[in-house]
Amino acid sequence: MKHNSIIYQIFPRNHSKEGTFKKIEEDLPRISSLGIDIIYLMPIHEIGFKERKGTYGSPYAIKDYFSISKDLGTLEDFKSLVSSIHKLGMKIILDMVFNHTSPDNNLLNEHEEYYYHKDGKICNKVPKWTDIVDLDTSKDDTQNYLIKVLKYWISNGVDGFRFDVASFIPIRFFIKARQELGNDIIFIAESIYEHDKFRQKGFLVNDDNEMYPTFNSLYNYNYFFKLMNYIKGKEKIDEVINELNKDKDNLRLICLENHDNERIANLLEEKRLSNFLDFISFIKGQIFIYAGQEYGNKHKPELFEKDPIDFSYCNKNIFKMYLDMIKKKKKQKEISDINFTKISDNSLLVKVKYVDDDEEQKQFIL
């Protein structure tokens, strides 16, 4: 995965009224024309019924890792989608949810020992996640099973994976998976930011620095929430700059929104949004876009319901901003060093050194 790749996140159920692979396939020419390198599909598997939230349930409560949700289509439909993505010069990665399953996953009957137990009972570490139960990913047998899952999807043409709450899963699992799958497979980690909070509860949480050698990129949550709080007027720009400088040596997946967080078009007016897009095109890391974001969509699709994105709406000014941002990112050379300095209460100076020893600096008003 290139340092300046553009990744496009799709929630298959809500990408169209039909919510199928075929409708995503029909949309591929439009997506490709944006300059997208990698399509990331949120979980496509059959969703559990037990303790289901909402009408349709969370795609992160998986009943069978080897299955495809019947609402989305068939395995042949999926293979056709993968083939079309590749023909357009893009890659595809799947969301892999290995920290937990639905309470009615077939594994519970076949291998109860794969699950996390506390006081002799199967349970989960985060109480509010009531529609799932946690796997015990520290066990070799559990890890070997999950690697079989990865191999199955690779055999169906997938180029890599985004691992849900990867910080909770032992790093040795990912090292083992990388060794068995090779370095060409894309590994992206949804790395959490509240490490100490969970460690105080006695849970294993990987440090980001120990995850980097195995992953192509990690989420930018370290400074994402600082940035969101600054946008909402809850924190000063100093907090954002301190986090950026602390994290400057790491390659992050840069997002302004995703399926878990508010649409950025609700938080920023057009002029300010333009400044932020200019900023993220300039700094180190791959760009991450959630479907509909490029049109200035303000409605975040419901996770547990059928709630299609309205692609008939397009803010042309915002759309042009995203096209410009993508073009700038594609022209960006690889960064070897980067530093952030406060200029005023709403602006910062970024100094960049590239791998070819060229240097550049730019001031951003955020």
Image (cartoon, rainbow, N blue to C red):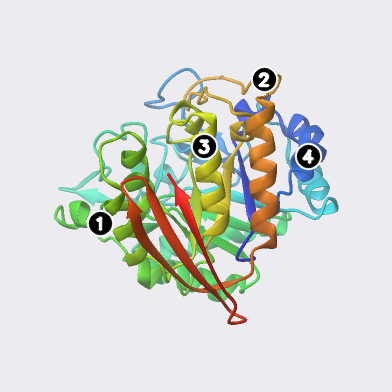
Image-quadrant location for residue 262: top left
Q: Amino acid at mark 1?
A: His
SS label for mark 3: helix
Q: Tell me the kind of residue under disc 2.
A: Tyr
Sequence order check, earlier mark of 2 and 3: 3
Instruction: Label 4: state its secondary structure.
Output: helix
Quick check: can you spot residue 118? yes
Look at the image and tell me in which quarter the C terminus lies.
top left
In primary-sequence order, the first of circles 1 and 2 is: 1
Can you tell which of label 4 and label 3 is closer to the viewer? 3
Q: Which mark is residue 273?
A: 3
SS state under label 2: loop
Real-space Cα separation, disc 2 to disc 4, in angstroms: 18 Å
The amino acid beneath tag 3 is: Leu
Where is residue 346 drawn, in percent x and y?
36, 45
Q: Residue at left 40%, top 23%?
A: 53
Name the disc covering residue 313, or none: 2
Distance from the alpha carbon under mark 1 to that under mark 3 = 30 Å
Residue on which the image places disc 1: 195
Disc nearest the viewer among 1 and 2: 2
Q: Which residue is mark 4?
A: 28
